[in-house]
């Protein structure tokens, strides 16, 4: 009994002064007067039963989430569609027994399911019920791009959000993002009450989507910047032999180096990791305990730059994305097809490339190429584009069972 009372007192102290907890490091969360753990628990890749992504191994997932919280993680991120709609349910169960009060909880509005204000209310109420909470600390508009941003803006989402904030059921509003820098900047400038944004960012994505420019712009506006895909969907954790050799010769762990590269930047508020095993949880907590701004040496940064160059060398198609080949008279997005294929080869992740390829409009895929070769006359790299289009489609399209 005494032990339990003592632990309760400690938990209250940790909540007010989290930086005194041994191990975990904490960081300023934008313009908010909050301290958030360097490592956040991303709940998109919880352990599952068999190969069914919707069937979460609940006991193990709960054990992992609670272990992370017990070791200083105080930011938990989930979303409406994770694990086939079951992710929020598992997170809600994990945050029972006093764990909810020890974390900042983030979830997201599924824009693709929203067509009215009534939809906003209905889905938000459903999320609160799944999460077994009366409020969420951070509510993000999920995966904004040019089209979904226009849609949700026309539905007056800010009026809705400010009402729910006034009811104290949402503490702060933010958004997650997948588009280019100009769209990112437009979204930030459109609303002066954003508290946070969530971007895909790692040492291989410095110039992609929001990129480094977006990171600095958002932080300069006072937004907390939450990082997703720090390992590029796990690709950077399992490097191909040529890259692994570089890490091994330097005696460095590729996962830790990717995470430390992010924590080294003052603009980064929290790095999310979608952890699937207890081993990953423990290792990432250990890495976070060694994190800090400006801790990487010049040699470390040069090593990461070498790895980046090697990844570029592994891309089989010498496309520079200059765009001279565009527009294709048949609608094929030639640079995009090259990028997807190159990344699949370079990161040893053809499965991921195949999924990406088959989830865009068919008219943009390599399969729509008719071999007119008009693009090849314009290509400064003299790439045999029509031949590559055939190969890309053959290797990336889903084959019927």
Image (cartoon, rainbow, N blue to C red):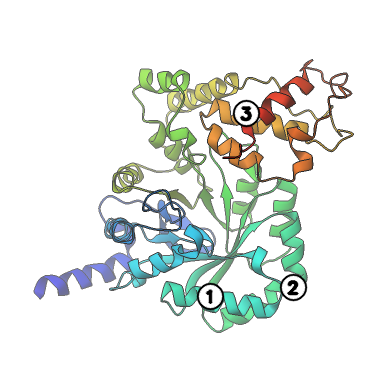
The C terminus: image quadrant: top right
Rendered position, 20 above or below 329: below
- Residue at point 77%, 31% (across, down): 334
Per the rendering, the mark at residue 19 is: none
Are the residues tagged 3 and 2 within 8 Å (C-beta)? no
401, 81: nearer the viewer: 401
Residue 116: x percent and y percent? 71, 76
Residue 138: x percent and y percent? 52, 67
Residue 342: quarter of image: top right
Distance from label 3 to label 1 (Cα)?
A: 46 Å
5, 85: nearer the viewer: 85
Quickly name the residue at label 3: 395
Quickly name the residue at label 2: 155
Q: Is residue 32 left or right of residue 118?
A: left
Rendered position, 384 above or below 152: above
Per the rendering, the mark at residue 170 is: 1
- Residue at point 32%, 69% (across, down): 99
State the SS at label 3.
Answer: helix
Q: Earlier in the sequence, mark 3 or mark 1?
A: 1
Residue 374: x percent and y percent? 89, 23
Q: Residues within 10 Å of mark 3 (few under 14, many from 20)?
A: few
Q: Residue furthest front?
A: 401
- Residue at point 33%, 44% (across, down): 280
Q: Is residue 164 left or right of residue 283?
A: right
State the SS at label 1.
Answer: strand
- Residue 212 seen by the camera: no
- Residue at point 22%, 67% (across, down): 10
Q: Residue furthest left?
A: 2
Are the residues tagged 3 and 1 within 8 Å (C-beta)? no
Q: Earlier in the sequence, mark 1 or mark 2?
A: 2
Distance from label 1 to label 2 (Cα)?
A: 19 Å
Rendered position, 270 above or below 331: below
């Amino acid at each position: 009994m005494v032990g339990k009372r003592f632990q309760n007192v400690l938990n209250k102290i940790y909540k007010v002064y989290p930086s005194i907890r041994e191990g975990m490091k904490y960081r300023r969360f934008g313009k908010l007067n909050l301290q958030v753990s360097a490592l956040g628990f991303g709940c998109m890749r919880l352990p599952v039963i068999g190969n069914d992504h919707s069937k979460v191994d609940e006991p193990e997932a709960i054990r992992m989430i609670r272990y992370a919280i017990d070791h200083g993680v105080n930011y938990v991120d989930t979303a409406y569609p994770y694990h086939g709609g079951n992710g929020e349910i598992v997170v809600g169960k994990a945050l029972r027994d006093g764990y909810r009060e020890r974390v900042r909880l983030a979830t997201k509005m599924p824009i693709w399911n929203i067509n009215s204000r009534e939809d906003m209310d209905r889905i938000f109420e459903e999320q609160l019920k799944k999460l077994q909470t009366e409020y969420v600390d951070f509510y993000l508009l999920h995966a904004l791009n040019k089209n979904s941003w226009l849609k949700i803006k026309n539905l007056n989402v800010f009026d809705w959000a400010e009402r729910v904030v006034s009811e104290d059921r949402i503490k702060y509003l933010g958004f997650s993002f997948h588009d280019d820098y100009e769209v990112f900047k437009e979204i930030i400038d459109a609303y002066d009450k954003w508290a946070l944004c969530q971007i895909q960012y790692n040492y291989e994505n410095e110039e992609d989507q929001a990129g480094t420019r977006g990171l600095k712009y958002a932080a300069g506006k006072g937004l907390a910047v939450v990082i997703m895909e720090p390992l590029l969907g796990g690709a950077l954790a399992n490097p191909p032999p040529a890259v692994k050799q570089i890490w091994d010769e330097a005696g460095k762990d590729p996962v830790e180096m990717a995470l430390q590269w992010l924590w080294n930047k003052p603009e980064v508020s929290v790095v999310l990791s979608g952890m699937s095993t207890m081993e990953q949880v423990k290792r990432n907590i250990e890495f976070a305990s060694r994190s800090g701004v400006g801790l990487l040496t010049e040699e470390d940064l040069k090593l990461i730059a070498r790895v980046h160059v090697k990844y570029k060398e592994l891309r089989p198609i010498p496309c520079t994305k200059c765009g001279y080949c565009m527009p294709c008279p048949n609608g094929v997005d030639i640079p995009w097809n090259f990028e997807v294929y190159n990344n699949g080869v370079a990161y040893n992740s053809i499965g991921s490339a195949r999924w990406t390829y088959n989830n865009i409009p068919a008219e943009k895929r390599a399969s729509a190429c008719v071999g007119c070769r008009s693009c090849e006359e314009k290509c400064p790299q003299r790439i045999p584009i029509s031949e590559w289009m055939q190969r890309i489609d053959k290797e990336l399209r889903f084959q019927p069972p």
